[in-house]
């Protein structure tokens, strides 16, 4: 089977980690009889340097014509990079917002997994980290406060700002369906997170999620207030399977979840539309301070590629092979600098990718 993948190497360490992921995908292709065809496009600072804007119409067309998009990272040092002297609409991150809109990506998936061999890197108590956890946050990506009407004005000499939090039942239903479908493939539990004791939008959220749950009798549903969820994530993350929540709550909770895994360099993510099409990227940034030094951790990008195989291409065995290879390499004590303990030997970005490929 042939799959066309548009790649966005991006800025900073992006090209290094995307190359490592391509190498792993090519190995998967050879083993399982698939062909992955890659086409690189420019986005972010790399596009600004060539075209003067963070994302061109031609790049968008290439992304839309692919079966999926694999991205590295975009952006640079906000204090020193000339990209951040431009108006906001022309800065690197504007390209990311634009491509999400153009590709109609409404569901963000952020797994948070504590690998057994990295339990010592976990910031939680040892008795908690020893139990491990494997959860995924399903975040609504195109509604809520971030996309509601907003204005800043002066009233009676006092500056005032208003942001509008709005959701309709259609937006809630489609993200809830994604969460329940994912839970069916995992441990059949959804925790829907809201602030229904205060917000009307959350009360509607809870009502619609309850309605959707009736179509998934095999999936256990529980509701949890967002402040309690934030506490429970650091108290007992192992209780969670799929966390479903709205845009801003998901933004905050997914960053919290990333920290308890020990390294953000291990965290994959995906953004999906209403079909199987998705954009897959690591959760970390472009790390311009280490770009080109071959010390970046490519595992998050490689695991993002595994998510692409699973969610966009329905290649579950192939995705399992990548995830198992990552676990094997970690169990052998092989580490990049960010996940190594003091004095432990490390390998570079390219070597880590090669070793994971060899273990497939």
Image: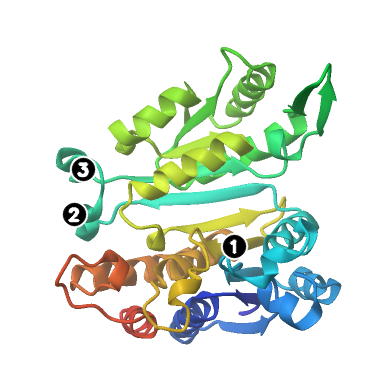
Q: Give the class, few, some or many, for how many residues have Cα within 10 Å of label 1's Cα (few <14, many ≥20).
A: few
Residue found at the far front of this picture: 157
Q: CA distance from mark 1 to mark 2?
A: 32 Å
**Residue 120 at x, y = what percent?**
18, 54
Q: Return the disc, 2 or 3, that comes first in the chain's sequence.
A: 2
Front residue of 194/65: it is 194
Q: CA distance from mark 1 to mark 3?
A: 39 Å
Relative height, residue 236 to residue 277 (above, below)? above
Residue 161 visible to an observer of this rendering = yes
SS at badge 3:
loop
**Residue 354 at x, y = what percent?**
36, 85
Mark 3 and mark 2 in contact (Cβ < 8 Å)? no
**Residue 141 at x, y = what percent?**
66, 45
SS at badge 2:
helix
Label 3 belongs to which residue?
Answer: 131
Label 2 belongs to which residue?
Answer: 120
**Residue 306 at x, y = what percent?**
48, 66
Q: Give the class, few, some or many, for how many residues have Cα within 10 Å of label 3's Cα (few <14, many ≥20).
A: few
Place residue 54 in its image quadrant: bottom right
Label 1 belongs to which residue?
Answer: 78
Place residue 194 in its image quadrant: top right
Q: Return the disc, 1 or 3, that comes first in the chain's sequence.
A: 1
Tell me which residue sits at (47%, 87%) in the image: 30
């Amino acid at each position: 089977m042939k799959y066309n993948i548009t790649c966005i190497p991006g800025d900073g360490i992006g090209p290094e980690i995307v190359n490592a992921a391509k190498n792993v995908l090519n190995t998967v292709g050879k083993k399982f009889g698939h062909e992955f065809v890659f086409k690189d496009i420019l986005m972010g600072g790399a596009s600004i340097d060539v075209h003067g804007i963070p994302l061109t119409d031609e790049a968008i067309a290439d992304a839309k014509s692919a079966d999926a998009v694999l991205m590295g990272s975009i952006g640079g040092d906000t204090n020193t990079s000339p990209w951040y002297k431009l108006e906001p609409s022309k800065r690197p991150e504007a390209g990311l917002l634009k491509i999400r809109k153009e590709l109609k990506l409404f569901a963000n998936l952020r797994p948070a997994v504590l690998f057994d061999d990295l339990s010592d890197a976990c910031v939680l108590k040892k008795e908690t980290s020893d139990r491990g956890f494997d959860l995924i946050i399903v975040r609504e990506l195109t509604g809520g406060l971030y996309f509601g009407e907003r204005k800043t004005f002066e009233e009676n000499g006092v500056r005032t700002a208003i942001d509008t939090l709005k959701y309709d039942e259609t937006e809630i239903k489609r993200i809830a369906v994604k969460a329940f479908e994912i839970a069916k493939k995992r441990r059949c539990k959804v925790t829907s997170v809201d602030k229904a004791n205060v917000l009307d939008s959350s009360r509607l959220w809870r009502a619609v999620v309850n309605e959707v749950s009736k179509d998934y009798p095999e999936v256990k549903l529980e509701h949890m207030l967002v402040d309690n969820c934030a506490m429970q994530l650091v108290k007992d993350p192992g209780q969670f399977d799929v966390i479903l929540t709205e845009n801003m709550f998901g933004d905050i909770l997914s960053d919290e979840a990333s920290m308890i895994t020990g390294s953000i360099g291990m965290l994959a993510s995906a953004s999906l539309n209403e079909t199987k099409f998705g954009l897959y990227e690591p959760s970390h940034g472009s790390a311009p301070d280490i770009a080109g030094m071959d010390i970046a951790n490519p595992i998050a990008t490689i695991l993002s590629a595994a998510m692409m195989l699973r969610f966009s291409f329905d290649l579950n065995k192939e995705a399992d092979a990548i995830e198992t290879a990552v676990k094997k390499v970690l169990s052998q004590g092989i580490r990049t600098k960010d996940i190594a303990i003091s004095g432990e030997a490390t390998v570079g970005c390219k070597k880590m990718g090669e070793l994971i490929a060899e273990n497939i």
